[in-house]
Image (cartoon, grey):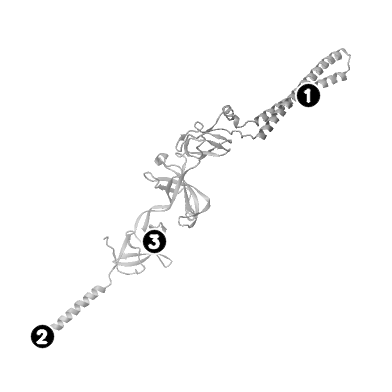
């Protein structure tokens, strides 16, 4: 009898231990979560984009006439002084070569011009002779008129004849000038490559001085060659005092940016962060495809440096930088991690840990930069909120902070 009772007690004990083990194994455990803290601090919203530097007013030196450009000795980076440094030199264009028929026609034109000049000289000699005769007749008529031997009308006819003879002389001299010009023009048509050396020695090279004080940005045409008028030769700019930053903003971001917003320029290659200010936002957008082939509407925004030029030494035209435009900032506001927020009943909410339980707490937020959110109502400083809450987490669930390990 005693043995049977002992066996029953032992069986009951074993069953109790198994039941306790199963209860412990399947008893709900607190969910491990990551926690963040609500605090007061500085917060800001920025628009971050890659950008490039450029000289605000680059100058392109072009050929003023069609001619022979001599070799450009300057190299990119060379410093130039306005009005003093000769950046390029050129000669007038060499005459074109003449074929046999054109040469013969030009020779015949010269002979014709010479003959016409001789005719004009003969006409001048005749006109001079007629004028001398008219001058003698006028002097005789004046003496006779003074003595009363001829009438007033005869006297006036002599004066008219003298004026007519003088006009004929002037006309003959003008005709000679015209014939001389025709002869020079005909002779100029015979200038060809046979006279290149003579033409160059007679012509002085045209100097092209630098229009500004700065540095050579690039040499467009370095070798000696023949160029038409208006051809770019080299580009000059002032990278020390005239440098700015151009950033291509998404049109949706450009609406948020205002003229005068502060800008931080980072990853430019030097030490520290450069400061700037939004100076202009273009009113005209353009379409651009991203690296993934996505069509985007972009808007150019110009940023002016506010730091002294000495702080950005080495930064030149067309360099890549990263612009961080600050569109809003508050030095003392209540903030919570953005990863704790989720949508709830057309608003926002978080899970706050209280006595080991997750408490669903509706909140009102202001600004959100993706890392921190401005809390306007619903939370206090020091409150601990659940980061990255899962869809299975419900109000009142037991939670515990995940260990660092």
324 versus 70 height, above or below: below
- Binning the other alpha carbons within 10 Å of mark 2 as few (below 14), some (14 to 19) or many (20 upward) gives few
Disc 3 to disc 2, how far (Cα)? Answer: 72 Å
Q: Which residue is mark 1?
A: 168
Q: Residue 181's quadrant in the figure?
A: top right
214 or 263, nearer to the observer: 214
Residue under numbered circle 3:
377
**Could you say where residue 322 lies in the image, as x and y percent from the top left?**
42, 49
Q: Residue at x 60, y 32 (%)?
A: 193
Seen from the viewer's position, the closer of residues 160 and 233 is 233
Residue lying at the far front in this picture: please name it.
100
Nearest to viewer (mark 1 / mark 3): 1
184 lies left or right of 228 = right
Neighbour tally class for label 1: few under 14, some 14-19, many 20 plus, Cα within 10 Å: some
Which secondary structure, mark 2? helix
Residues at discs 1 and 2 in contact (Cβ within 8 Å): no
The N terminus sits in image quarter: bottom left
Separation of marks 1 and 3 at Cα, in angstroms: 108 Å
Mark 2 = which residue?
A: 2
The image quadrant where one finds the C terminus is: bottom left
Question: Between disc 1 and disc 2, whose residue precedes?
Answer: 2
Residue 342 marker:
none
Q: Secondary structure at mark 3?
A: strand
Question: Sequence-wise, which precedes: disc 3 or disc 2?
Answer: 2
Q: Residue at x 35, y 66 (%)?
A: 390
The picture places residue 207, in percent across and down from the top left corner, at 54, 31
Relative placement, left or right, of 311 versus 14 is right
């Amino acid at each position: 009898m005693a043995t049977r009772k002992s066996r029953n007690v032992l069986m009951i004990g074993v069953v109790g231990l198994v039941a306790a083990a199963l209860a412990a194994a399947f008893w709900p455990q607190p969910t491990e979560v990551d926690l963040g803290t609500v605090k007061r601090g500085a917060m800001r919203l920025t628009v971050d984009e890659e950008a490039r530097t450029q000289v605000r007013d680059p100058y392109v030196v072009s050929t003023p006439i069609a001619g022979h450009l001599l070799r450009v000795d300057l190299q990119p980076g060379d410093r130039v002084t306005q009005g003093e440094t000769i950046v390029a030199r050129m000669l007038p264009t060499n005459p074109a070569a003449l074929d046999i028929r054109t040469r013969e026609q030009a020779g015949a034109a010269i002979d014709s011009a010479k003959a016409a000049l001789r005719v004009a000289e003969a006409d001048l000699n005749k006109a001079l002779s007629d004028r001398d005769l008219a001058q003698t007749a006028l002097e005789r008529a004046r003496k006779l008129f003074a003595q009363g031997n001829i009438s007033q009308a005869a006297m006036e006819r002599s004066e008219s004849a003298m004026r007519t003879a003088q006009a004929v002389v002037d006309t003959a001299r003008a005709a000679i000038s015209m014939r001389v010009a025709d002869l020079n023009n005909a002779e100029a048509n015979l200038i060809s490559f046979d006279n290149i050396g003579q033409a160059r020695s007679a012509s002085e090279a045209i100097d092209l001085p630098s229009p500004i004080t700065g540095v050579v940005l690039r040499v467009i045409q370095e070798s000696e060659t023949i160029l038409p008028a208006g051809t770019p030769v080299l580009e000059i700019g002032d990278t020390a005092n005239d440098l700015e930053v151009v950033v291509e903003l998404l049109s949706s971001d450009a609406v948020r940016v205002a003229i005068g917003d502060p800008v931080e320029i980072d990853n430019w290659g030097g030490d520290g962060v450069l400061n700037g200010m939004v100076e202009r936002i273009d009113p005209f957008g353009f379409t651009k495809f991203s690296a993934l082939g996505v069509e985007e509407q972009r808007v150019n925004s110009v940023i002016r440096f506010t730091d002294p030029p000495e702080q950005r030494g080495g930064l030149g035209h067309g360099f890549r930088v990263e612009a961080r435009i600050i569109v809003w900032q508050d030095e003392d506001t209540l903030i919570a991690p953005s990863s704790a927020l989720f949508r709830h009943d057309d608003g926002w909410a978080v899970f706050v840990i209280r006595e080991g339980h997750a408490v669903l707490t509706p909140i009102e937020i202001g600004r959100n930069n993706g890392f921190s959110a401005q809390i306007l109502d619903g939370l206090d400083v020091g409150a601990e909120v659940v980061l990255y809450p899962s869809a299975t987490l419900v109000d009142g669930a037991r939670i515990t902070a995940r260990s660092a390990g």
